Amino acid sequence: MGVFETTVAKGDEILKFIPQRAPIVMVDEFFGVQENVSGSGLTVREDNIFCEEGELQEGGIIEHVAQSAATRVGYICRSRGEEVPVGFIGAVNDLKIYSLPRAGETLRTRLTVEQEVFNITLVSAEVTVDGKKTAECRMKIYLQQ
């Protein structure tokens, strides 16, 4: 069973898993968690704060990956009856941007947890549009305790 087969939350339902609010919400679909992998999505809109001349800029892709990680943690915490923590990007490594998504296109992000130690999580992310790799990176995230 693939991580993108079942939608767990969509649209405003995402807000129960992340601390971000408009205009900086960069995840609009969440597909859940399977072991150490989770899936999320974002349909790029022309009015997105990170969109310039119809293209989602690099900063928007990075923020989407970070919020994908936040959605994963928020989903896990909510399922345990815990509060959603605030997280911070500690580092972005091995970032490769292959193309900038255009308004109307939908990102699908596969996030794999490589390591979790205390309040630090290291993830790798692969972002695709229509099955074609758009970006990839590794990200270190710190959760506020």
Image: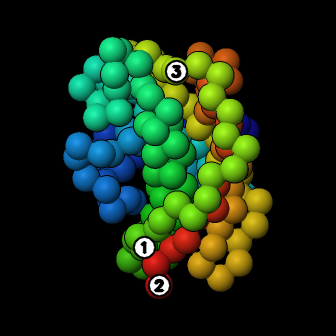
Q: Determine whether the residue tagged by mark 1 lies in a helix, strand or loop.
A: loop
Number of the front mark, 3 or 2: 3
Q: How many marks?
A: 3
Residue with the mark numbered 3: 100
Query: In the rendered structure, which amino acid carries the disc numbered 3?
Result: Leu
The figure's colour scheme reads rainbow
> Which residue is more in the foreground, 140 or 20?
140
> Which residue is more in the foreground, 79 or 65?
65
Residue at (42%, 73%) from the top-left corner? 85
> Which residue is more in the foreground, 39 or 107?
107
Q: Residues within 10 Å of mark 1 (few under 14, many from 20)?
A: some
| Disc 3 from disc 1: Cα separation | 30 Å
Residue at (48%, 59%) from the top-left corner? 70
- The quadrant of the picture occupied by the N terminus is top right
Q: Residue 120: x, y in percent?
A: 63, 73
Disc 3 to disc 1: CB gap under 8 Å: no
Disc 2 to disc 1: CB gap under 8 Å: yes
